[in-house]
Image (tube, rainbow, N blue to C red):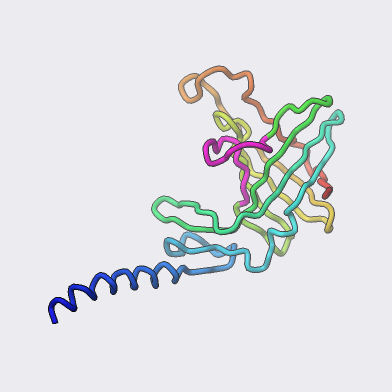
Amino acid sequence: MKNILIKIIPFIFIFTGIISCRSQQIVPLNTGWYTSSTGTYFKDINNELDQFVGTWTANYANNNTITLIITKELQKQFQDIDKVFYRDMLRVRYQVIAGGLIVHSTLNNNFTLNKDYEFLSLFTKPANNEVILMQNGGRCSVGLGTVYFKKINTNQFQWNYRVQPATINSESCPPPYDNDKVFLPTVENLIFTKQ
């Protein structure tokens, strides 16, 4: 009897582990994470993010152009102070052209290795057809800010970018500073059109 128990106990632990892994809590995208348990998955159940997926362009000041490539990523990990969660989110890659030259592009960035220019959705406001995103800004967080997408119709959305002030010094951000600037347009109510 003792030998049988010794052989069965490891299988009980493995089975319990498998069951607990499969019992991840799934909640709607905008559920408050501060009251949710670790491991919760915030799922885009109503497909609120889908309307922003695609390639979008806008023209602004002096014939500058910005192109956004927006993709939806499922069950991406994020972390609060002491909890790990998962959520569906938008990832934005972009290219800015001024005077016919590419002045900045994140189209080929590997954000796993370098999160400086990462640009991800935080939450949605379904009643307003909006999604709120965070742009990390770049090296030394120059350009860190919040971006608001408001859907106008199936082929257009409105963009507003609120840049947080940045102070650069040699203590917090070592030189050179020649490429530390805001590349994204800060034009109010900029209209993007789906390509």
Residue sitting at the far left? 2
Is 24 in front, or is 80? Answer: 24
Q: Is residue 85 above or below residue 178?
A: below
Per the image, is 118 magenta? yes
Q: Residue at x 82, y 41 (%)?
A: 58
Residue at the outermost bottom position: 1
Tell me the residue at 67%/40% (across/down): 162
Q: Does residue 175 appear to the left or right of 149 in the view shown?
A: left
Q: Is 3 situated left or right of 111 in this image?
A: left
Q: Position of residue 59 (x, y in %)?
A: 84, 37
The residue located at (48%, 58%) in the rendering is 85
Which percent across, then down, holds residue 56?
Answer: 79, 46
Can you say whether 7 is above or below 193 in the image?
Answer: below
Which residue range is magenta in the image?
106-121
Q: Quadrant of residue 143?
A: top right
Viewer-side residue, 72 vs 151: 72
Q: Is residue 193 magenta?
A: no
Using the rendered view, name the quadrant where residue 182 is placed: top right
In the picture as drawn, the residue positioned furthest to the right comes out as 63
Q: Main secondary structure of the magenta part?
A: loop
Q: How many marks?
A: 0
Q: Position of residue 29 (x, y in %)?
A: 59, 63
**Closest to the observer: 45 or 143?**
45
Q: Is residue 55 above or below residue 84?
A: above
Q: Quarter of the image for the N terminus: give it.
A: bottom left
Identified at 52% across, 68% down, the residue is 26
Q: Nearer the viewer, residue 80 or 52?
A: 52
Report the side of 160 relative to 63 (left or right).
Answer: left
